[in-house]
Amino acid sequence: MAEQLTRPQARRSFLRIAAAAGLGLLIAGCQMVPSGRPRPAPEPVPTPTPTPTPGLPEDTNRNRVAVLVPLSGQNAGVGQSIANAANLALLDTGGQKIRITVYDTAKGAAAAANEALADGNRLFLGPLLAEDVRAIAPLARRADVPVVAFSNDVAVAGDGVYLMGFDPAQSIDRVVGHARSQGLERFAGLIPNGDYGRRASQALIDSVERAGGRMVAMQPYDRSTQSLRSAVTRLGGQSGYDVILVADSGRIAITAAPLIRAGASPQARILGTELWKSEDDLGGTAALRGAWFASVPDTMFNQLRTRYRARYGANPYRLASLGYDAVLLAVRIGQDWRIGQRFPEEALRSDEGFMGVDGAFRFGRDGVADRMLEVLQVGAGGNSVVSPAPRSFGD
């Protein structure tokens, strides 16, 4: 457990704080949205963790919020990056009404959750992994503590669990809709084996149907060049297609694209998912240039990255934005959170939504964050926006 502390600061408006920082992050994070409708990142340098002390100091002026992330093991880099960004958000807002404590889920998610509950935390931010969400959800539910998790597995959402992770179904739906708006009709899919692939394949089928297109072929594969080659060959033998979704990471797309260009439908438009956002050299593969994928906007994240690098001496993982936005959300709702009382969970379900580093979002009835996504086109010089993210949920 690591206590995240800030120096006391005089209360000031969010606008003045943001102006002093020269950054639009705080304004975006606390603004309400009008109603209406890998190649892995470099591993951040962990910040020193204070030596744990028995129990936590008593708080009479702040509510306790737990950040549950892996700080050891194979996901330590991502977890530390999220924790660092969460602390940065607390610093940016002044942290007058909440106290953040970080707990290591890699040593046991249930144990971390029980420790957090014993310490008096009344809101959980995290965990990262779906299996950890499953482990802590019953404990949090019995204690009447909402969970705002960083997972993207919609199967663990609901009944007090809210997901901030990027749902692949939303990314697929957005890019399929854009493809249909450009006159493309016949869709194919290259789908990896596993849970993500199963969710992506159903999302593709549903999205094509909603958009009025035709699903003509779909092939599974495991993550090897030979399996990809065989899957592309089988697709060519089934039917011609105008557009093909590679429902996997940018690294896999880089391998698959030349195979697609050498196959039966070499002119097909290639589509990707939100996973492509983690790959910074897609355009270095000529066969991928012109491909489309949908993701959250990067404008505010780029500012966060600069601030993060200045404080921690390393680049954050892309998922660090989830930690930052989760704290902004807690601070925003925490203005009306009475000290020592349960977190006002009903505010999480506001139809108005919230604005954060990753753009506008709101939690649906299923507990999954509904996000405003832009469509990007891969180019030799980087990605360019071909369809901007909507400004509000009614657009």
Image: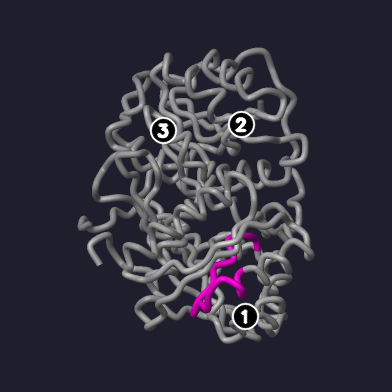
* Callout 2 crowding tier (Cα within 10 Å): few <14, some 14–19, many ≥20: many
| Earlier sequence position, callout 3 versus callout 2 | 3
Q: Which of the image's four quarters has the C terminus? A: bottom left
Helix, strand or loop at label 2? It is strand
Q: CA distance from mark 1 to mark 3?
A: 41 Å
Secondary structure at numbered mark 1? strand
Query: Which residue does the numbered mark 2 point to in the structure image?
Result: 102
Mark closer to the chain start, 1 or 2? 2
Q: Which mark is residue 382?
A: 1
Q: What span is colored magenta in the figure?
A: 235-249
Three-letter code for the amino acid on which mark 2 is drawn: Val
The image shows a total of numbered marks equal to: 3
Mark 3 crowd level (few <14, some 14–19, many ≥20, 10 Å Cα): some
Mark number, residue 144: none
- Tell me the distance, in whole angstroms, between the alpha carbons under discs 3 and 2: 17 Å
Q: Secondary structure at mark 3?
A: loop
Report if the CB atoms under discs 3 and 2 are less than 8 Å apart.
Answer: no
Disc 3 residue type (three-letter):
Lys
The correct choice, above or below, for 231 with respect to 14 in the image is below
- Provide the residue designation for mark 3: 97
Q: Is residue 285 above or below residue 123?
A: below
Quick check: can you spot residue 229?
Answer: yes
| Percent position of residue 155, x then y | 47, 37
The answer to which image quadrant residue 276 occupies is bottom right
Q: Are marks 1 and 2 in contact (CB under 8 Å)?
A: no
Q: In front of the other: label 3 or label 2?
A: 2
Horizontal side of 202 relative to 244 (left or right) equals left
Q: Colour scheme of this structure image?
A: one colour
Confirm whether the magenta stretch covers residue 233. Answer: no
10 up-or-down from 111: above or below? below
Q: State which mark lies toward you, 1 or 3.
A: 1
Q: Is residue 239 magenta?
A: yes
